[in-house]
Amino acid sequence: MSADNSCADVSVPLRNVLNSVQCVRDRVKDGESNESSGMFNLSNFWDTLTQAVKAASQEATKLSLAFSKPPLPTQEDGEKLAESIQKSVLALSTVYYWLPKSHGITLRRLVRDATAEVLDGIVQLVDVIVSSPLQSLSQEQLQSTGGVWSACDQFAHLPRDNRAAVLGVLESYIGVVKDAIEEMEQAQAESQDPFSDVLDDEDLDARGNQDTYWSEEDRQLIAPCQGLMKASAACLRKLLSAVKANGNVSMPECVAQLDDLADIAKEVSPSVDDLALSLYPPMDYSGVDQNACKLTLVLKKVLDIIRASHVCLEADLNWVQFLDGALDHNLQKIKALIQGSS
């Protein structure tokens, strides 16, 4: 049998498994969990998932090694390799589906994304091998194999319950808001009219070009807007501390409350970004007003959901009330300044 025929024969099962893994991956990305009336053991789930991930990594490695140098695997060996890949992929996706929504939507999203990333990596690896099975080990095949390993390795770092999952996403949101605040402070420190030190006040007023710098009026408006942004960061930090101290995953209603907190907190950083962007010169006061109102509304929703949740103890009501008042104070100041400028 010629090398070309051998290549064609061995690529058939690989193409079949490529299609199969793509279908499994798409179902994982779009599919729902298998809600079961039976008992679900989270510790058992993680043990089984860890084994399934390990098996998928090993099968991907075996496949890559088999096509790393001549001679090519026989058609029979190719079929066995493809079958082993398919079994490991089906096992991994099946275990993922075990995780019920009642153990946390936030946790489940993280496990889903990690599972889909492994499947994406296997799809890429098989595709590379199918595209060039007669070559020696290519850089692309090495990178694809490494991609599968990397995707599998991240399972060891996934949060093990919904409380830990929510803490992780809250920390990421805090980081984004902190960056926006620091960027605005840096922009203020660096931004000034380049001619302000050589022109008289009268000449500066006559120039009237504020496309690239802030006027004194602008800077006065920025202060309470920064107050809103800092209140956003404080709100998320306080929420993080409350979840860390009081978060409960022993009851479904508490798990669901943690998901609600994570979902509403997700809206904070985009709203902070929108407000920050509207503050850059030339400043559009109506846009600032709109974005300040939107951020305040989001933060008040966050505070309302915190108040109603199990993470908010009686002692926490003090900071919730304080932040609520800070939002009103800054928004009133923003509206007064904008009204005064018109």
Image (cartoon, rainbow, N blue to C red):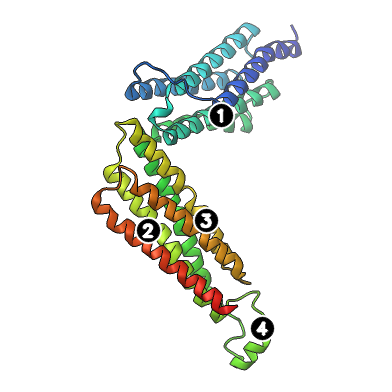
Q: Are marks 3 and 1 in contact (CB under 8 Å)?
A: no
Calculate the distance from the C-alpha at mark 3 to the C-alpha at mark 4. 30 Å
Q: Nearer the viewer, mark 3 or mark 1?
A: 3
Query: Disc 2, disc 3: CB below 8 Å?
Result: no
Q: Is residue 79 visible?
A: yes
Which amino acid, by three-letter code, is at mark 1?
Lys
N-term-proximal mark, 4 vs 2 = 4
Of labels 4 and 1, earlier in sequence is 1
Mark 4 lies on residue: 208
Q: Which residue is mark 1?
A: 29
Q: The disc labelled 3 sits on which kind of residue?
A: Ser
Residue 165 visible? The answer is no
Figure quadrant of residue 283: bottom right
Q: Is the C-beta separation of discs 4 and 1 under 8 Å?
A: no
To which residue does mark 3 refer?
271
Q: Label 4 amino acid?
A: Gly
Q: Which residue is mark 2?
A: 234
Position of residue 229 measured from the top left corner of the image (x, y, whole percent): 45, 62
At x 42%, y 34%, the residue is 107
For mark 3, give the secondary structure: helix
| Residue at (32, 45) in percent of width and height | 243
